[in-house]
Image (tube, grey):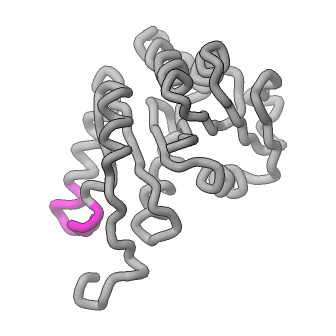
Amino acid sequence: MKRLAVYCGSATPADPVYIEAARAVGRGLAERGIGVVYGGGKLGLMGAVADSALEAGGEVIGVIPTALVNAEVAHRGLTALEVVETMHERKARFTELADGFVNLPGGTGTMDELWEALSWAQLGYHTDPIGLLNVAGYYDKLIDFWRHMGSVGFVRSQHRDMLIVAETLDVLLDRMAAAQPTVPIIQMTREQL
């Protein structure tokens, strides 16, 4: 994995555990020689990931839509900042530039990015690993819901291990590096569907 898309919030929650985790992720990726592709903002967890990666000598590429350049206060000190027209272009660029996805805590935008990465992997639009860093139990209920979707039958058995979960970055990256692509829906037989 040369680069990872890091999905996280542009907010700074009151509990410092989230911003500290974001800083640790940026620093940890840079120390492993893994570049960061992210939303291009300088606020909240986004900014903490970018700044920590840059301080540790890492590559950081931001991708931000024109409409959000001012709202998210685009980070002008990155290795590269790409300004695109739409959110769809932004997410497509994440997939093109990265070799996998790491999801930190965030809000609806982060959830949108996570679900799209999972959906695209199920369909076969990419084969990259998708990691969920469960900081302070933030994603416990989402993990339970993912399992529930599988137990009910809305996530096929072939795809249930697609979401890679860990509570520390090192464990998450090791699991992601060892992950094997699943059979995408577009390659399944009618009987498998």
Q: Residue at x 18, y 64 (%)?
A: 152
User: Is residue 11 at all visible to an observer of this figure?
Assistant: no
Q: Quadrant of the C terminus?
A: bottom left
Furthest-left residue in view? Answer: 151
Instruction: Work out whether 12 lies above or below 139.
Output: above
> What segment is highlighted magenta in the picture?
148-159
**In this rendering, would 89 be left or right of 148?**
right
Q: Nearer the viewer, residue 134 or 141?
A: 134
Q: Residue at x 29, y 63 (%)?
A: 159
What type of secondary structure mainly makes up the magenta span?
helix
Q: Position of residue 146 (x, y in %)?
A: 27, 51
Instruction: Work out whether 99 lies above or below 127.
Output: above
Q: Assess whether residue 103 is covered by the magenta stretch.
A: no
Q: Position of residue 191 (x, y in %)?
A: 23, 89
User: Is residue 123 at all visible to an observer of this figure?
Assistant: yes
Furthest-bottom residue in view? Answer: 190
Q: Quadrant of residue 185?
A: bottom left
Q: Residue at x 36, y 44 (%)?
A: 176
Q: Residue at x 56, y 24 (%)?
A: 30
Q: Position of residue 131 (x, y in %)?
A: 39, 42
Instruction: Work out whether 162 lies above or below 4.
Output: below
Q: Nearer the viewer, residue 11 or 166?
A: 166
Q: Nearer the viewer, residue 34 or 88?
A: 34
Q: Assess whether residue 154 is covered by the magenta stretch.
A: yes
Q: Position of residue 136 (x, y in %)?
A: 31, 20
Q: How many marks?
A: 0
